[in-house]
Image (tube, rainbow, N blue to C red):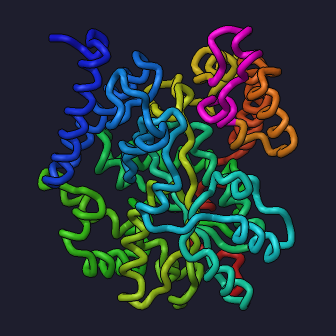
Amino acid sequence: MSTAHDLSLGELYKRVSEQGEVVRDLKAQNAQKDEVKGAVQKLLELKLEYMRVSGHEYQADAPPGKVPSDPAAQEAETDHVDPWNVQTSSAKGIDYDKLIVNFGSSKIDQDLIDRIERVIGKPAHHFLRRGIFFSHRDMHQLLDAYEAKKPFFLYTGRGPSSDAMHVGHLISFIFTQWLQETFNVPLVIQLTDDEKYLWKDMELEEANRLAHENSRDIIACGFDINKTFIFSDLEYMGQSKEFYMNVVKVQKHVTFNQVKGIFGFGDSDCIGKISFPAVQAAPSFSSSFPHIFGARTDVQCLIPCGIDQDPYFRMTRDVAPRIGYPKPALLHCSFFPALQGAQTKMSASDPNSSIFLTDTAKQIKSKVNKHAFSGGRDTIEEHRKLGGNVEVDVCYMYLTFFLEDDERLEQIRKDYTSGAMLTGELKQELISVLQPLVAAHQERRRSVTDEMVSRFMTPRPLNYTC
């Protein structure tokens, strides 16, 4: 049987077209989630092979021999985003403008950034200025309330699936820490060890252990212990009647058909998965934390999170007014690419897919040099003449996250796209940023004691003034 690597360009184009039809048919039939996922993955693999052979991306209106129309027209055709899977066939990554339209959120535009800066009296975080946090729900409304002296709290989370977190996991926590410090508000951090047990092949005790282990990396991000409560679902559910009551309220107001439509659950999914979205929704409500907010039910929540988590909170925002609570506001983060490129997925089982927070300086240098996908040209002469492509170059992408100096980043962009800077030099720039960043995190983590973890994870009053 021939593989994609054995096919002619014409046969490969036909195979991609046929697989696209398979994907569309499965979606139209509301097929099982795993079946759709497998078909989408096969389509992405075929498209990548087509691009490798042809030198350009597959387009439905451009069979071999026909000049492609608009290269961007089909770019995001197979973007797939849900809480468990993120897939794209484009080397540039997900089309976020299209995702905003599909999800019905609002773009973080310059007007909103300017308003945030006026409210806080200082420059916005570079994650906002550079579009890393790119989408929102009700941020203007939350700022209206804040200017009217109405309080809010922050809520974010982590699904503890491995001992070692990677640098991509830091993005939401770095930004959330900035929000906490800037607005001087309390924060709750949910560790969904129950979710990981339901979705992963692991023991329940192991999921809970990983929650405590990951909490050390989270604490090392610099959160204020007097304003932060970190909790494991497996532990807090039994400690707080109010939290569980909110879970049950959400469960009552979401039908099975709704949860299937939102999350794609099928008949073979366990009932734990089907009921879990209510558990992730409950921290959005201040009454879930009586030790922090007392009997108050009106304190609004702001959730910084990856855009893949938005389905949970679309459901939450629909339910909230029906059970007497304010809708949470959201700030959505873009995805952090794997070292091998925006089309591939980071995995804890593949140590070369990202930079992990346990990596040594030597490992960081080796991974960047060997595995970071380059936007450079095939030869030095060609690169000097044509320059590199920062839209697909992973080292430059990583620098947009972690190099805080705007002027230096812009100079790197100019030098690389003009050909003045070579790929090896760009990789060295990233290495020089990542090595001290990871080393500093490791040093802070070593200072996190068992007593500190226990204190962060103990339900208690926070330094919070209504």
Magenta stretch: give its range.
Answer: 375-398
Q: Residue at x 44, y 37 (%)?
A: 69
Q: Position of residue 273 (x, y in %)?
A: 26, 57
- Residue 13: image location, x then y, percent: 29, 25
Asked whether, in this view, residue 221 is left or right of residue 412, the answer is left
Residue 289 x, y percent position in the rendering? 51, 77
Residue 34 visible somewhere in the drawing? no
- Give the quadrant of the N terminus: top left
Residue 182 locus on image (x, y percent)? 77, 68
Q: Is residue 198 magenta?
A: no
Taking the magenta stretch, the answer to whether it contains residue 376 is: yes
Query: How many dots with numbers?
Result: 0
Image point 56% across, 77% down: which residue?
138
Which of 392/428 is in front?
392
Q: Is residue 98 visible?
A: yes
**147 versus 436 height, above or below:** below
The residue lying at 37 percent from left, 35 percent from top is 59
Tell me what residue is drawn at x 21 percent, y 51 percent: 27
Question: In the orientation shown, which residue stands out farthest toward the front?
Answer: 66
The quarter of the picture where residue 135 lies is bottom right
- The picture quadrant where one finds residue 372 is top right
Q: Is residue 345 above or below residue 14?
A: below
Say left or right for 245 vs 291: left
Q: Nearer the viewer, residue 408 or 254?
A: 408
Q: Say which of 245 and 36 sits in front.
A: 36
Position of the C terminus by quadrant:
bottom right
